Image (cartoon, coloured by chain):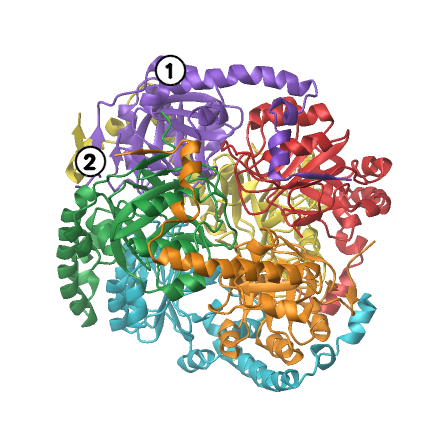
Chain colours: A red, B yellow, C purple, D cyan, E orange, F green
Amino acid sequence: MNKLGIVKRNILRADRAAVERLGHFGVATVHEAMGRVGLMKPYMRPIYCGARLSGTAVTVLLHPGDNWMMHVAAEQIQSGDIVVAALSADSCDGFFGDLLATSFMARGATALVIDAGVRDVKELTAMGFPVWSKGISAKGTIKATLGSVNIPVVCAGALVNPGDVIVADDDGVVVVPAEWAQKTAEAAEAREANEGEKRAKLAAGVLGLDMYKMREPLERAGLRYID
Amino acid sequence: MNKLGIVKRNILRADRAAVERLGHFGVATVHEAMGRVGLMKPYMRPIYCGARLSGTAVTVLLHPGDNWMMHVAAEQIQSGDIVVAALSADSCDGFFGDLLATSFMARGATALVIDAGVRDVKELTAMGFPVWSKGISAKGTIKATLGSVNIPVVCAGALVNPGDVIVADDDGVVVVPAEWAQKTAEAAEAREANEGEKRAKLAAGVLGLDMYKMREPLERAGLRYID
Amino acid sequence: MNKLGIVKRNILRADRAAVERLGHFGVATVHEAMGRVGLMKPYMRPIYCGARLSGTAVTVLLHPGDNWMMHVAAEQIQSGDIVVAALSADSCDGFFGDLLATSFMARGATALVIDAGVRDVKELTAMGFPVWSKGISAKGTIKATLGSVNIPVVCAGALVNPGDVIVADDDGVVVVPAEWAQKTAEAAEAREANEGEKRAKLAAGVLGLDMYKMREPLERAGLRYID
Amino acid sequence: MNKLGIVKRNILRADRAAVERLGHFGVATVHEAMGRVGLMKPYMRPIYCGARLSGTAVTVLLHPGDNWMMHVAAEQIQSGDIVVAALSADSCDGFFGDLLATSFMARGATALVIDAGVRDVKELTAMGFPVWSKGISAKGTIKATLGSVNIPVVCAGALVNPGDVIVADDDGVVVVPAEWAQKTAEAAEAREANEGEKRAKLAAGVLGLDMYKMREPLERAGLRYID
Amino acid sequence: MNKLGIVKRNILRADRAAVERLGHFGVATVHEAMGRVGLMKPYMRPIYCGARLSGTAVTVLLHPGDNWMMHVAAEQIQSGDIVVAALSADSCDGFFGDLLATSFMARGATALVIDAGVRDVKELTAMGFPVWSKGISAKGTIKATLGSVNIPVVCAGALVNPGDVIVADDDGVVVVPAEWAQKTAEAAEAREANEGEKRAKLAAGVLGLDMYKMREPLERAGLRYID
Amino acid sequence: MNKLGIVKRNILRADRAAVERLGHFGVATVHEAMGRVGLMKPYMRPIYCGARLSGTAVTVLLHPGDNWMMHVAAEQIQSGDIVVAALSADSCDGFFGDLLATSFMARGATALVIDAGVRDVKELTAMGFPVWSKGISAKGTIKATLGSVNIPVVCAGALVNPGDVIVADDDGVVVVPAEWAQKTAEAAEAREANEGEKRAKLAAGVLGLDMYKMREPLERAGLRYID
């Protein structure tokens, strides 16, 4: 019954090409393309601004104050993975610092998404290893309790299965189920193509009211203009 | 009775010259000059640092999860306006992104102040369109419910009437009632003039204790020095 | 009985050399070297990124909405001090701005750590005066109530005695009791020396699992690998 | 320009009969009857459960840590008033306790609504004096700074003019502008009458889907039933 | 790809007998019996104290400000169900009041668990319909957007599949996957049996140090007693 | 250097008579009598209302997710003690439940004050064992890391030395240093005596404005009455 103390070695990662395509879009676009689901809570913030990337999830479930499983997770990382760390209860301690980042990078990870705190952010920024976290804290952790690696986890309110696509930027983090990767990439592309034209019109002074033909529905809804 | 579903087209904007003068001061200075009222809650943060500006308020009242009225507001924008978006109940979804920003900029708006979330912050930053918001979220909104444009609103704890002056910088956002613009600008100028001299003295090592003649009142209040 | 209204003039500052040695390490390293105590709450954030420094604490106890004691504290500052401001109850008003910063810098202070808000952050950033605070707010304060200077205070959850060492960086703020300064610096140096080697191994792809010999204890704890 | 330091003695209170009628309804009903505006933030909680009442607002603007104006407000209370205390900046100190409650009750006030903390809640509960507040704190306040009485204030996100109707119960607090009192009471009565019938149907097992004729619009919106 | 706009009619509910057995235990006991997973965030609080119950989950995914799907969910309720409402983004509006409660009760639901706000809590308390929620708010919702019913949802940080067992009391809410219900009930019974004996010993003054044989491991870990 | 892993057996408890006298007063009164220091943060809330008591502190320092030291603390409890549990970093897990409460009660403890979560609140309420905590959570803890017992700790923002007096009621928790117990009790008695007369006057309709002779200072401060 217990799902703690398990490491799943072989996981099915989302299609590499689809993952890469998704990395060209912002989180907001991907989230819209999926139908407005899969977003992590907005308290997940990048430790530095400007990063935008995608990768496949290696998941890890940690307990408050204990980062033992991060070392177990490191071994399961393949090139292009993003480690997604969930907690069994709220904690903002610093579960991750520059040593673990060195190890994760050496294994091919491109980022960490963690529903807890991180530390050594000055060093992580210098290393160019992006982290989306709930907070920053110098408080270290112990290595005493088993969690699990590559099981389904809930991270910052979003369900993440190992192998799912993670897309992250300054707007936050979104999870694309592996089996939706292809279609979501297509939908995002269609959406983006469409947006270029809209942007040009709006820049030229056309109003959304006209471009989206909102005047009539607004009037029907009862909008009144007064002077 | 209902104040929803109304768009006021003709609003009295604060005197342009006074608005510009106020833009030379920081929010803290303007707030002091007004007698310490009119400040928005400190959770209102800029999406990027360093901006400092003033403008006249075009107000909009939105409902959680619904940004329909932002498009209605766009049409009411004049050059030099700042859109001030209030919510009828707390929400941190992303009500505003790069498309709306393109439209607002084309209409002449210089900033957005919103008691909710925004998205596309990487793009907004690149566009140089400053936003003060409660948070950042990729979660989009629908277009189904009427709110109002250019009615008095409470935004982040501050009452804003359409046409009021908004001053914003890294310290936050302050609202100057249109009819106070002139006097507040004068008071801010007087305050600032005064501060230059003080700054020079303090930089030279003079203590505030002496400059402000605090030693005697402190002693009277019972301050004791011990070794 | 009352500990309000007192200014202690002669305080025993931590050994200058030890303070300087501690300034070479990050907060996380110092915190570990001390045995994981003395950390301020993680809500204490720098107003700008990248600063890392150490200094000796001049403490001040303030009441909500009142910064009178900051001027009293200014006189007690010596070169290399960091002012640590605690509050008798929660407040996020702006107790400190560019004028006080000018005065503190002139007196030799290198930073401010305050369990409340600050303002003029654009100016403070330009001046290069680092502040770790609970928040940013343009709301000013009055000068009406006595607090104390150089008494033991609880700042952001940490006990600070005047003269203690404060180390601060992007990870937060840690307090090293003056009498531990020497030993903590030594422990931090030992720790850091040790980390260089570890970092190299991890960068070369060695796993923490092997480097820290975790495989056997993990197995003993019941970790199971599945495919 | 300054609106601090003012006490308005003659205020226009909402029609007494309308105020009483509004007191028969819950906050949710009144809020709906007004068109979903005027609600205070949901962090406003009663110090004890079960109270439901209405009254006319005597407003007071306080500064953090200072309750001097509460005594000034006491003199302006008339029978059936509810004191509404707003803060110029966030504070959760205890601005109100059993002595002030004794005075307010003696003057005819029936409740306090305060965007800050209260204390002596055990005594206030025993006295049967209901308070809706942001929190509970034993931290007292000083009497040093002027605020104002009976000016328009923003309390917990809602604009309150002196004389407006306040309705409060376990769901929170809603503000009905004095000039809307009559119409809102009528709308609330109509709403309530209507609800009795609905309640009976629902209790008998009729579904809202059928009662509100939602099946067709749901289908049109694309709802799919699967097995 | 889209999982919005779906209602699953036939769901596999956890074994009735196991659900009932689980209802005899507190949330803490069930959580321990499951191996410390499945707990909702501690911000989920009952609207009144003292309730303790179990039931099978009918899940519903709502959007901020929109409770349309609650009516769709009502039709799917069977006797002994607990409705579990998740949100696609944070909202604390009042999605549920006494009318919906009347309908849910008539359909056989025994409670509501909602990651948002509720209203009419005075009435809900009088009706004896327990609700665990994130907050209380009189702010109503609209009926404009499709969500889904009986899909897997993340509610207050916990994954809930339709048919899972929900156990709730003053400590919070825990989710037991349907397939674990039997074994968890057994484990909880074993645990509880065991606790009676422990309780008697502790009540008699026996120390946990001795009862759990902790003295030796504590000494080994380095615990030192000083006078 | 390390202050972890220590249990101090002989502590100097505050004078028993003074502790008892302090127990007759509310937290607000004691806090005032001490000069407005020593208050724990207002997030510390009782698990049930109405309790008011005093006792001597047995302190314990815990790490997030680990309650091992609670068992060590139990042995140090003497009749009339209140256990004060501090955390080395924020955590809201349930560190304490009915078994530990049984043990603490058997040892003579009258309450627990903990800067973290508790569980089994239904049982604790039935047992009549009052707890002031930061929250409620069913999430259990492990027993793996050493903390300390009877060292000075910072609990919810207040410094507590073993043997200090703890006074707690619905308003929160205040700490009276052991050496101040006597004088604080006297000051509280004087204050309370004084309050009876004031209460009678206010109940008779006398205004604080007159009773405290505030009219003249208010006028001097510039208060203006308008009609």
What label does residue B218 carry, if any?
2
What label does residue C18 carry, if any?
1
Whole-number angstrom distance, CA of label 2 to CA of label 1: 36 Å
Residue that appears at 56% across and 32% down: B50
Picture quadrant of residue E18:
bottom right
Q: How crowded is mark 1: few (under 14 residues within 10 Å), some or many (20 or more)?
A: many
Tell me the element at label 2. Answer: helix
Which is more toward the observer, C120 or F76?
F76
The answer to whether E45 appears left or right of D85 in the picture is right
Picture quadrant of residue A130:
top right
What label does residue C70 carry, if any?
none
Tag 1: amino acid:
Ala
Which is more toward the observer, F18 or E67?
F18
Chain ID at mark 2: B
| E25 in relation to C106, above or below | below
Which is more toward the observer, A215 or E38?
E38
Q: Position of residue A22 (x, y in %)?
A: 80, 39
Dividing the image into 4 quarters, which one contains the C terminus of chain E?
Answer: top left
Q: Residues within 10 Å of mark 2 (few under 14, many from 20)?
A: many
Q: Position of residue A85 (x, y in %)?
A: 64, 40
**Do tag 2 and tag 1 residues touch (Cβ < 8 Å)?**
no
Chain ID at mark 1: C
Looking at the image, is mark 2 or mark 1 nearer the viewer?
1
Tag 2: amino acid:
Leu
The answer to whether D170 appears left or right of C219 in the picture is left
| E63 in relation to C195, above or below | below
Q: Can residue F187 be seen in this view?
A: yes
Q: Is residue E62 visible?
A: no
Query: Which residue, as the protein is rendered here, is positioned at the far top?
Result: C17
Tell me the element at label 1. Answer: helix
Which is more toward the observer, F93 or C178?
F93
